Image (cartoon, rainbow, N blue to C red):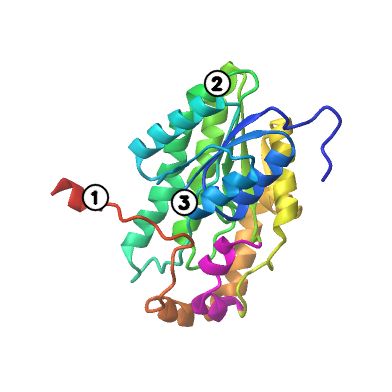
């Protein structure tokens, strides 16, 4: 995708979470090539350092986005190194299959901790710095926020919450001149798809690893770059996601009818299958442990 005349990311100061791999890493490289100044947050330090080198020795920090104190400190440090902030991309997220009945509740807790609280903490820390006429926040949600599949309840719930956070923040920042976008992606060619959804249980439902087929990452990164340059309200990839979003109830009914045959067997598999999180997570105290 070529940017429109007058639209450019050159000179923008951009903070990206989840930047060690996948969407975050690819976006950092492309924005740097387009003249943006990027700063990176993530968990995998060796991968982050490599991406940073490829982005002109961009500043980076280890950061568990589910830890508010870490987010506050890391964002402040990187904003100081950048000399300000124009854009924050709240991209960090995890996925892991979960049968809602009989599954491990820790999966739900961890997923919400990263995908919802992590996005909130990121926006809370970066928000004051982007609250200006050229400011922009992009929240990475998912088609899963609109169309919900069996075994993906934790992930879908978290991405629906991200969508809500984006829609709310858009109203709350409007008076500052800053804008807010929400990205909706189907299954892209990333570890999120292959590790998070490419399980035996998923195959038992749909006969293959994904519902719609894996789409290339490149067009999604082009779309995000364009969204940042234009401060767009919505980003989709592949293109057909934009067609599905307005017809959520119909799409949900089609999914429910077409996938119901294999669900019982898939649930049996999922309750014993060792499916990993898409990115290994640091151990956080569970709520009951913190209150003890």
Left or right relative to 126: residue 28: right
Compared with residue 67, is residue 79 higher up or lower down, i.e. above or below?
A: above
Mark 3 near mark 2, Cβ–Cβ under 8 Å? no
Q: Which residues are magenta?
A: 189-206
**Residue 197 shown in magenta:** yes
Front-most of 97 and 131? 131
Residue 244 to residue 132: above or below: below
Which residue is the site of mark 2?
Answer: 131
Residues packed near mark 3 inside 10 Å, few (<14), some (14 to 19) or many (20 plus): some
Examine the image and state in which quarter residue 170 appears. Answer: top right
Q: Nearer the viewer, mark 3 or mark 2?
A: 3
Q: Which mark is residue 287?
A: 1
Q: Nearer the viewer, residue 292 or 278?
A: 278
At a point 82% along the width and 46% down the height, the residue shown is 1
Marks 3 and 2 sit apart, C-alpha to C-alpha, by: 30 Å
Element marked by disc 3: helix
- Badge 1: few (under 14), some or many (20 or more) residues near its Cα, within 10 Å? few
Q: Which one is earlier in the sequence, the residue at label 3 or at label 2?
A: 3
The image's mark for residue 45 is: 3
The answer to whether one can see residue 238 in this image is no
């Amino acid at each position: 995708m070529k940017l429109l005349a007058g639209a450019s990311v050159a000179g923008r100061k951009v903070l990206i979470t989840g930047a060690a791999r996948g969407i975050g890493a690819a976006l950092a490289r492309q924005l740097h090539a387009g003249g943006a100044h990027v700063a990176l947050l993530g968990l995998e330090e060796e991968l982050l350092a490599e991406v940073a080198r490829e982005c002109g020795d961009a500043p980076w920090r280890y950061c568990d986005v589910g830890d508010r104190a870490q987010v506050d400190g890391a964002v402040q440090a990187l904003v100081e190194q950048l000399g300000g902030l124009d854009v924050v991309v709240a991209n960090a997220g995890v996925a892991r299959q979960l049968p809602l009945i009989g599954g491990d509740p820790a999966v739900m807790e961890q997923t919400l901790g990263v995908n919802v609280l992590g996005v909130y903490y990121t926006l809370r820390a970066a928000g004051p710095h982007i609250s200006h006429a050229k400011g922009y926040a992009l929240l990475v949600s998912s088609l899963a926020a609109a169309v919900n599949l069996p075994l993906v309840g934790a992930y879908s719930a978290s991405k629906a919450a991200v969508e809500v956070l984006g829609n709310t923040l858009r109203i709350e920042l409007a008076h500052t001149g800053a804008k807010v976008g929400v990205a909706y992606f189907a299954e892209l060619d990333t570890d999120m798809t292959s590790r998070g959804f490419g399980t035996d249980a998923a195959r038992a439902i749909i006969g293959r690893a994904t519902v719609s087929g894996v789409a290339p990452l490149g067009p999604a990164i082009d779309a995000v770059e364009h969204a940042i340059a234009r401060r767009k309200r919505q980003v989709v990839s592949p293109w057909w996601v934009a067609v599905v979003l307005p017809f959520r109830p119909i799409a949900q009914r089609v999914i429910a009818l077409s996938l119901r045959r294999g669900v019982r067997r898939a649930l049996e598999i999922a309750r014993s299958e060792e499916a990993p999180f898409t990115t290994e997570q640091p151990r956080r105290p569970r709520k009951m442990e913190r209150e003890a």
